[in-house]
Image (spheres, grey):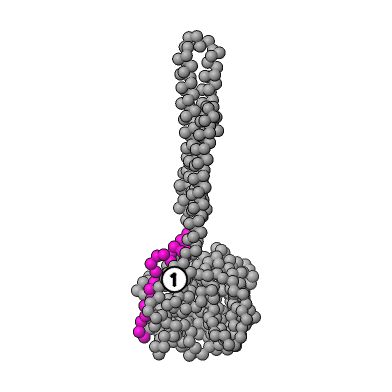
Amino acid sequence: MLCLSSQTSCRSLFFSTFAYLWLYLCFSLSLTACQSSSQLYSGNRYVMPIQSVNAPTQCNSAQSAKAWAVVAGVNFYQDERIPDLKGAVNDAWNFYHYLVSPNGARFEPDRVRLLLNEQATRAGIEDALGQFLTSACPQDKVVIYFAGHGAPEPDRPEEAFLLMHDTNLDSMVSSAVSMSQLPKFLQWRAGQTAELLMLIDACHSGNIKFPNQRGITSTSLKNSELGLLEKTRAKSVQNTLKKMVKNQNGWGAISAAAANQTAGESAGGVCQLAGKDYNGGLFTCALLESFDGKADQNQDKALSLDELFKHVSGRLVSMRGLDQIPQRSGNMSGNQQLFPTIDQKLELPQVPLRYLQETHPHPYRPWLYGSLTLSGVALASSIAMNFIANQSARDANQYTASAATELAGPQGYNSLSQRYEKDRSTAMQLYISTAILSAIAGSLFTMDALHQPEGEAEVYRRAPAIVLERQAP
């Protein structure tokens, strides 16, 4: 730091720099507080996801039945050989909000676990099914919904898996969820629940590039061969799903397509929900549509298994003909009431951008880099001017010893002294500019570090994406 003038000038420079740094600290702390408070925001129209940890409850037959759910959707996969999806997260997001909405199914939010993308890992699903559902009692109702990829191992087509965000195709046994082991796992961890319904929209596996164990890759196949491969994988998933619920009373499953068919995603307005093009699976689009009352044939404001399946099947046939026919399996009674229909209207919030973008933008980065560059230039200029001012000081101090003293007199000394003051003032201004630019760069760095793509708190302040209104059957 430049300290060639009086002590007063040095103290002034020190306190000025300290003041700027103090303002930067206050700004950073206030920004952090604003970020923290936004995470606590709870919308008026929606129910935010609650990732609570429920301790196992003491069950007795006198307790009223409760409803539990695990909802998962995966768009993005870490293994680059697994193609990303566009609408799986949207499907899970909308179904979750129907479940927990006071105008929807009215599930208690702390009894519903929502897992999207990086949350829907193998460990996350196992925790939800094997730890979270341990609080369910025998008389309770459990709903499991999954939207994403489902596929068998290449060499063991009878073993089907649900592919999680962190699934590795080289080690599916340890990184995916085995559908053949899932019933035993649920019975072991969740007990003999009176009612369990699985909704699976997970037959999108045709372009998965499995390890080349037999000299064949998806890219080397013709379209007809690729279609046959897709149907083979879908058949494995569907057959495994049927086995899961076959021998368990009160358990049922509805899958998106038949064993020799594939499940499609809505594109180009194939499926519309509340008058808007739906971005997601056709199966889930029809499922959400059934909640508005049109599927309620007996007008009891509740959907039975028969009513739900009849509506979804009819809608899928109307959208895709005979190319996609949903399947039901298990021992659940067709008269079993599954979900209530909406009373007046149901508002579904928009999906946060953080779940729709695999790589998140950093809007402050250009400004951060610019301020860092300017502060570096200002610092270098400050150091250079500091040397110049020091040289001016040495010239003034040596003036009385030089031969020019007698010739120039006091006027020459005053000229050197003025040059030093000017250089010193310029150096001080550059140091202050460096401090200001550094504080700005620090603030931008803090904002960039704290910045998160649009999340629940933001979208809950905005208008809903879809508004379902009560319809007559």
Q: For this rendering, which residue is in front, 67 or 350?
A: 67
Provide residue 107's location: percent of width, then percent of height. Answer: 49, 78
Provide residue 304's location: percent of width, then percent of height. Answer: 46, 87
Question: Which is the main secondary structure of the residues drawn in magenta?
Answer: loop
Secondary element at image label 1: loop
Q: For this rendering, which residue is in front, 319 or 211?
A: 319
Q: Amino acid at mark 1?
A: Tyr
Q: Is residue 425 visible?
A: yes
The residue under the point 48% across, 9% down is 407
Q: Quadrant of the N terminus?
A: top right
Q: Which residue is mark 1?
A: 46
How many marks the image carries: the answer is: 1
The residue under the point 36% across, 82% down is 471
Which residues, given as a range, are shown in magenta? 453-473
Residue at the far top in the pictured view: 406
**As drawn, 334 above or below 355:** below
Label 1: few (<14), some or many (≥20) within 10 Å? Answer: many
**As drawn, 255 above or below 175:** below
The residue under the point 53% across, 36% down is 14
Q: Quadrant of the C terminus?
A: bottom left
**As drawn, 5 above or below 378:** above
Residue 461 among those drawn in magenta: yes
Residue 261 among those drawn in magenta: no
Provide residue 151's location: percent of width, then percent of height. Answer: 56, 74
Q: Is residue 224 visible?
A: no
Left or right: 237 as drawn, with respect to 269: right
Provide residue 129's location: percent of width, then percent of height. Answer: 59, 75
**As drawn, 252 above or below 352:** below
Q: For this rendering, which residue is in front, 207 or 187?
A: 187
The residue under the point 39% across, 88% down is 299
